[in-house]
Amino acid sequence: KVAFTPFVTLLPLPLTPDVAVAADDSTTTSMSAAWNSVDGLNSLESEKKFVSFDKTAYQAMVNDPSRTPLFEKAIINRLKSAEPNTQTVLDLGTGPFAFFALTAAKNGAKQVYAIEASKEAAASARTIIKKEGYEDKITILEGFSSDITLPGGEKADFAVAEIVGSIASEEGAYATISDAHERLVKKPNDPRSWIPSRIQTYAAPASYSLHNLFRPPAFDWSKLDGEPVRFNCRDEGLQLLSDPVLVEDISFADIGKGTVPNERISFTVDGKRVDDNIAKFNEEFKRGRVADPEAASIVAGNSVSGIALWPRLLLDDDVQVNTRHYPEGGHQRSHWQTVMPIMAPEPVAVKGGDRIDVVFDFDVPSEVTKPSSYKITADVVGV
């Protein structure tokens, strides 16, 4: 589910600055949420084991100017590092347009093996490849890569794997790359064998405008049952309270050494961010005709609803894909969403200098068809 903050449709709501759940001086308020990677998303199977996408989602990926041109650049750079028509390329999760497979074929790859688990996407990819005239260079292999052996036992010189979720690991990248390491790539321990070479997840506590405006008993956020809200990348209804921190870091060349967090990280609420967020919420609330927008924005700006998460991709040494501005975490255009579970029935009040102690407990399995699961617990400590 993608959250768009529809302020223009909001009716004026009575809201006063004392309605947030207080985290008073010297008190601790606990928050938590747990979910798995397919909750709220399309799944390839009825058993909801693996994230999948419809064609409009794939089109949004192709049209993303912060993603596609950078992948193209990295692929072309990698192909230029060797003589033309000498490299075999593996495209893991080619999608219905086989876009990166075609990029490789058009720029000097000897052979491209494009793997796609979705029957419909694989059929679409075959049609497009035939139309483009690259049937001799691109072979579509349908199924999960863990069930596929390349023809003749061949291995790829490098692999393109845009299987990165809004939490980097949620589309099964860890399991997929672990398997490819063993069977499908010639030099799996070389970072140049992978595009991207590394995927990361960043996190920060955040305020959410609608969580403040819609409250119990009229609106019951607990019915989400931990399922995170997935925000459009430029939704100003979500604002960060602290500087982002790296919480997940998976190197494809050292796949067994990727960090999957299960430790406490302390965030400090930034007073300047709070002031900036109040100003942004105030403008939005005015446009949305919220009753007493100034008071409402003070409440929203001084509150935490959950922990926001988003991915960052390091394609090679010189090319990175940032889904929010790096390193401060500001909004920017991206097809990737920012994920945030609502971690309490009502927002918890905070102020500059308060501490939010967070434990990230990510269970990222080594089986492709087993969804990752995520649990976040937090203590909001008033100072």
Image (spheres, rainbow, N blue to C red):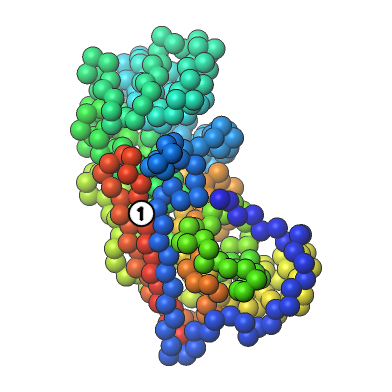
- Image quadrant in which you'd find residue 373: bottom left
Crowd class of label 1 (few under 14; some 14 to 19; many from 20; radius 10 Å): some
Q: Residue at x 47, y 62 (%)?
A: 225
Q: Position of residue 374 (x, y in %)?
A: 37, 57
Q: Nearer the viewer, residue 304 or 241?
A: 304
Dividing the picture into quadrants, the one containing residue 191 is top left
Q: Which residue is mark 1?
A: 373
Relative horizontal placement of residue 229, taking residue 256 as reference (left or right): right
Determine the residue positioned at 59% across, 35% down.
56
How many numbered discs? 1
Name the image quarter holding the C terminus: bottom left
SS label for mark 1: strand
174 sits left or right of 130 in the view: left
Along the line of sight, the residue nearer the viewer: 252 or 9: 9
Name the side, left or right, on which 304 lies relative to 279. Answer: left
Q: Is residue 343 above or below residue 86?
A: below
Residue 338: horizontal and vertical position, in percent?
52, 54
Q: From the top left corner, tell me how far across and down residue 105 is, in percent.
A: 43, 18
Residue 89 visible in the picture: yes
> Does residue 86 lie above or below 196 as drawn?
above
Residue 271 seen anywhere in this rendered image of the structure: no
Return the residue nearer the eye: 255 or 31.
31
Can you give x and y, in whole percent of width and height, for residue 68 in the image? 51, 35
